[in-house]
Image: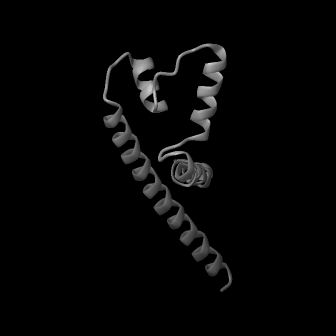
Amino acid sequence: MVKPLRKWNLITLGLTAFSWFGLGFFYGFGYCFLTDWHWQIRDQLGYPTPFNSYIHFLITTLFSVSVSERWVDVLTASLFFAALIMSILTNLRDYKKSMKSKGDGLR
């Protein structure tokens, strides 16, 4: 991730986690307000939404492959948590470097 976008990456991952787990507490684990919005628009346009997962919908529709929804959910969650961990570690490293350089400037 390019340095100027690292904080934004962490913010979007945090918003995703909030939607999946925070809002998911009320609407069901993995709930995404953007996916819900997309499904509402598709319904209004008369397009069927026979999928529970947006990622499963994309894989099935864009690549014309049939994969298990469970497999897609596990892969999506695994890649999400890997990205979140890497983003946290990268942002912590950047923060420590910036604090160190600020401290060096005081001497």
Using the image, determine if residue 21 lies above or below residue 32: below
Percent coordinates x, y for residue 2 in the rendering: 55, 48
Percent coordinates x, y for residue 12 in the rendering: 59, 48
Near-viewer residue (38 or 103): 38
The picture quadrant where one finds residue 85 is bottom left
The picture quadrant where one finds residue 64 is top left
Near-viewer residue (102 or 45): 45
Using the image, determine if residue 14 lies above or below residue 62: below
Near-viewer residue (106 or 60): 60
Question: Which residue in the rendered view is the most extreme toward the bottom?
Answer: 107
With 68 as the anchor, is 5 left or right in this view?
right
Residue at x 47%, y 54% (from the top left corner): 84
Using the image, determine if residue 47 lies above or below residue 39: above
Report the colour scheme: one colour
Residue at x 59%, y 27% (from the top left corner): 39
Percent coordinates x, y for residue 26 in the rendering: 56, 50
With 62 as the anchor, is 27 left or right in this view?
right
